[in-house]
Image (cartoon, rainbow, N blue to C red):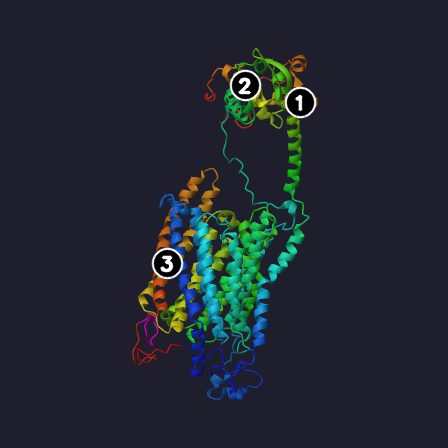
Amino acid sequence: MESAPDSHIPSAEHGKQRALIDHSLRHPVMFFFTSGAAWLAVSLVLAMIATMKAHSPDFLGNCSALNYGRVFPAHLNTLIYGWGLQAAFGVAIWLMARLSRQESRSSVAILVAGHVWNVLVALGTICILAGKGSGIYWMDFPEFIWAPMLATYAAIAIWSMIHFRVRRWQHIYVSQWFLLGAIIWFPWVFLAANLFVHVFDIHPLMVTASAAWFRSALMLLFFVPIGVAAAFYLVPKITGRAVYNYSLSQVAFWLLAGLAPWAGMQVLMGAPIPTFMPFTSAAATIAVVIPVLALTVSLFKTLKGKAQTVAHSPSLRFTVAGVIGLLSYAIFGAFLARPDMIAITQFTSAGYGLDIVGLYGFFSLTMFGAIYFIVPRITRREWISRRMIRWHFWLSIYGVLTLLGCIALFGSISQGVAQQDWEQPWYSAFMATRPFLIATSIVWGFMLLSNVFFLFHLTLMWLRLGRRSNHPTLLTHDHSATGPHGREGLIDNN
Amino acid sequence: MDSNPRDTFFRRFSTFWFGLGLFVAFGILAVVIVPCSVCGKVDAEDKNAERRMKVNQEVNAAEEAALKEANPTTAFDKVGAELLKQKPSASDKPAAQ
Amino acid sequence: MSDTNNNSFPDKPDLDETTNVTDAHTGLNSPAAREKRLKEEGLEPLSLWVIIGSAIVLLIAGGVIGAGGHMFDYQKSAPVKYVRAVQPGGGAVDKPVEAMEAFMRKGEQVYSTKCASCHQPNGAGGTGIPPLAGSEWVTGHTQTLALIPLNGINGPIEVAGKSYDGVMAAMGQGLSPAELAALLTYVRNAWGNDSGDIISVDMAKEAIALSNTIGAKSFTAAELQADHAVALPGEALDPTSLVNKRTLVPEKAAE
């Protein structure tokens, strides 16, 4: 019976409703995905330039806009605000609309807001490259950008709140918990950090602590819930099973809500701030492993015995890889948050490496999974090339694993240990890190390649050049006329 | 589509404003509380600066008093004559090793 | 399992009061199926390993908070093990240097910061500023020389055959004894002045003590010549002996 939340035998009526919802949201969602993917490609180009500049400063000459101090913040901020937030918006508004069974009546407003968002990100990035960035890690856009950004966010996200409140059924899906959480937490985190950093006239150390807190809070209270929401939708949907132990997910939600706001300030261990701040943050970062573990267990139990499905479905592959990425992010974050590890890795690239594992290894992979699921349903076409999807997947996996090893773990620890040897000149610490930096540049190159494939593929879909077929693009080859999808050529995607 | 008794205009309207209010709630709280708690705070840096400025002013006053003012033209003539009288000397002597 | 023709609201989760358990089990004819545990959807069992893993994580997190130590005591804000101390026997070791060389080096540094702007780097002085090169006040009695930067000097003074009449502030106030000793030694031995001796750190300490006793009084040339035309008390330091190049204190060479 379709009225049960987890039944997957579609009735014609509900299929039609879903199609109407998808139709109403097609413009904003495709816009967010495509422009997000474009910003991702830009960010990866900047990442390559930044890491090349780190070990060979004469790469691309002496242009001041391409110096490391400008290119690196530009890379990170386009990754977060250009790609991360836009992918999050696209997935969040579609997912909330679908789960609440509400058609979107405000697609025009969302689309306009999306364009404004892109203008703001572009403006901010140009300012950073021109040298006008604020210099605060993760908040490098100049001061005037944050207020319009928050207003634009409100114009995008408020409609999802309305959808939730007027939802058809009383039952709340796991994903809706996390989406609502993320929608409400983002303004709090963003507003709090920007007020304390840019507006209020407070002690400069408080400014530093607020910026450090923002970095972790944006990750744990916005990116993590959105990625988890996507996973908790796709896994049951594609495998056809109910979520394993719904109450566990609720407990995990409240644990995350309680623990995550404390985290972030462990990067300031040893700074002249009150001692309880870095230590509580370190403990909270370690404790966040518990809700993440609970969520991962719930998802993997739902997937139990469905390895074939995971292998065949691009969405599920990416999502499962993303969930593993989330667990790695939490565990390595906890590992690096111990005070003795912080003493070694505090002034190394460990923090950046961990950010990349979280932003790419978890969040981007989950978003790719969601995008591979959503786009065929909105454009009513299927993905064109199985091969591009495979390349995208494997290059991303290899890339993330290498980056985890090179930057987050071995590179940073070797850099830290070499820096601790204070009787040597600092140059020797740099030479110890140099091989890892070179490996990192190469890896960014491969990831750029894989995402150029993705952007190209996505743009073709956006231009409605996808395959008109009843057969979804799966990563296997068995499609016959007698299979469950019937004959090729019928467009009736569900 | 079947009717949804929860989907009323009032609900949408109230959720819209309630949601926007929720988004900015912490901001309003912060804007109200933080400036009130920061004003009247005495900064250690400012206190030290006051002390240093006092010493600076005393030194300046003493130097002003000790300065014997002269007409610029006579001063330039005198200084110029002195400079002409001085013999050139090597100023870049390498430091004694 | 419960049937419904209600389109607006979903089914309640299976197994509530309205469900008849026997009816729910019809169709499962074999006793094995009937005895099978019916899991209530949404409350499947949780593996013990998850709970154990969470407990271990919680223990580690608690340990980290414990490692914070005095978290709210602002007097003890630097955790004990966090500030690295030099291992006993480890650390960079300064080789002791010949005394005159060490004093001259350090003295030149102090001079260029404090004195060179007026007296010139070559000690030649300027308009209204007496030279130090070839000055009898510099190469003369050490106490006279020491009190000039420590207390300041004013009024008419004759230096190297020319007379000057100005005011010098106590530019040497705030120098450490080592810095003062190095400065005085430097001016006595540079630019052709060849007193050949070293004003040691102990002598500089005596000079500073004397200056503090006298208080903040700027001398005139006459007063200096009358009352302080003596050498500073203290043992002479052999210019060829070895000293630590930072503290300018005599030190034996390491074996």
* Type of the residue with mark 1: Ser
Of residues A86 and C156, the one drawn nearer to the viewer in this rendering: C156
Q: Is residue A471 within the magenta segment?
A: yes
Residue under pointer 3:
A398
Mark toward the viewer: 1 or 3 = 1
For disc 2, the chain is: B
Query: How many other residues sit within 10 Å of disc 3, few (<14), some (14-19) or many (≥20)?
Result: some
Q: Mark 1, residues whose alpha carbon is within 10 Å: few (<14), some, or many (≥20)?
A: some
Residue type at mark 2 is: Asp
What label sits on residue C211 in the rendered view?
1
Q: Do labels 3 and 2 share a chain?
A: no
Identify the main secondary structure in magenta: loop
Tell me if A209 is positioned left or right of A373 in this view: right
Q: Distance between the residues labelled 1 and 3?
A: 73 Å
The chain to which mark 3 is attached is: A
Query: Which of the two residues, A475 or C247, is positioned nearer the viewer here?
Result: A475
- The secondary element bearing badge 3 is classed as helix
Q: What element carries label 2?
A: helix
Label 1 element class: helix
Is residue A265 something one can see in this rendering? no
Rounded to the nearest angstrom, the CA distance separating label 3 from label 2 is: 80 Å
Stretch in magenta: A466-476
Residue picked out by circle 2: B77
Q: Where is residue B96 in the image (x, y as percent from the top left)?
A: 47, 20
Please name which of the two marks, 3 or 2, marks the residue nearer to the observer: 2
Q: Does the stretch in magenta take in B21?
A: no
